[in-house]
Image (cartoon, rainbow, N blue to C red):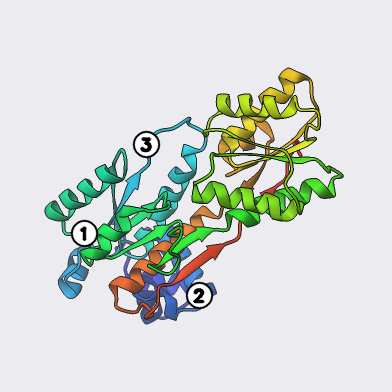
Amino acid sequence: MVEKVTIATVARRAGVSRQTVSNVINTPDVVREETRERVREAITALGYRVNQAARQMRTGRSRLIAVRIEPARDGINGSVLDRFLHGLTDAAGLAGYRVMLYTAADDADEIATYDELLSAYDLDAFVLTSTHHGDPRTSWLAARDVPFVTFGRPWGAPETHSWVDVDNAAGTAAATEHLLALGHRRVGFLGWPSGSGVGDARREGWHRALGSWGPSAEATDGVDSGASAARAMLQREEAPTAIVCASDSLALGALQAARELGRDVAIVGFDDTAVAQAIGLTSVSQPLAEAATRCVDLLAELLDGRAPSTPTTVLLPPSLVVRKTA
């Protein structure tokens, strides 16, 4: 007969007290990070699951949070949020929460879905992704006192609620500095149309590191549109010898255009997707698992009444993964 895994079992494996295990599950911020990680590793290894029914009776909460599945795109950059969802599910499970997934085509559809979900389920909170300028979703939830955090800052109003984000500008700045160190002086940028918070931040990082405005082009996110925009940029009289791209999809398009034109151009993408890893594309990697864990930690603070009086903002540094394209 398989022995039931309890808090005591986890405590013995991690070499801590039962209270420490309970703190990691319920109030992780009071436990040192190294101890927290050791306990979480023990929980995962042993397959420990919190008794949700007993916990709900004690707290009056469902321990259920909801997050949207992004619409399918080109199959490349869409995988980024898939990895975030995987990390969020893992982190939520370790903290004693369950994740409900839903779909929505746009902001209005998502807000209508909030209304339906809150009427049908005893949800504790939401995690929002793909934030943007003038985002109406956060205002709708805040007006109804529904707890939430966002993966992505509230562009234009950074102190309105708690959020976790990746420093997009730092990522493209690192990519540009890497190319400059390789001897490139005409470093171009292939980005999204202006007005996107994330896209504008990635453009700003390139500009800041370059110290001036170099050759640039805009395209909707996709391989074909990226190839078309890069082709035009590479046919200019002062064509770039290297290009920093706002996504791996655009970078794949730039690689395609460079091959067609017979140009030896260094290319850097953003998001370090599985495709980038497979073809050897240098790319900026986001710490998605850490971002997901921090989102769960912030939600736990809100739900347990431990959140500070002002919203908590977490900006995580990305990293450049150098491969054969640059």
Badge 1 or badge 3: first in the primary sequence: 3
Q: Residue at x 42, y 53 (%)?
A: 133
Q: Residue 279 at x, y = what percent?
A: 66, 31
Q: Residue at x 12, y 52 (%)?
A: 120
* Residue 51 visible, this orientation: no
Residue pointed to by mark 1: 123
Q: Secondary structure at mark 1?
A: loop
In which quadrant will I find the C terminus?
top right
Residue pointed to by mark 2: 35
Q: Is residue 44 above or below residue 282?
A: below
Q: Is residue 24 above or below residue 136?
A: below
Q: Residue 81 at x, y = what percent?
A: 45, 45
Badge 2 or badge 1: first in the primary sequence: 2
Q: Residue 161 at x, y = what percent?
A: 38, 67
Callout in the foreground (2, 1): 1
Q: Which residue is nearer to you in this view: 239 or 308?
A: 239
Measure how far apart labels 2 and 1 are at the Cα level. Answer: 30 Å
Amino acid type, residue under disc 3 in the picture: Pro
Q: Residue at x 43, y 64 (%)?
A: 157
| Marks 3,2: beta carbons within 8 A | no
Amino acid type, residue under disc 2 in the picture: Thr
Query: Is the residue marked by circle 1 packed among few (<14), some (14-19), or many (20+) residues within 10 Å?
Result: many
Q: Is residue 235 above or below residue 106?
A: above
Q: Residue at x 84, y 50 (%)?
A: 181
Q: Which mark is residue 71?
A: 3
Determine the image quadrant of residue 259: top right
View extreme (right): residue: 183
Q: Is residue 122 left or right of residue 268?
A: left
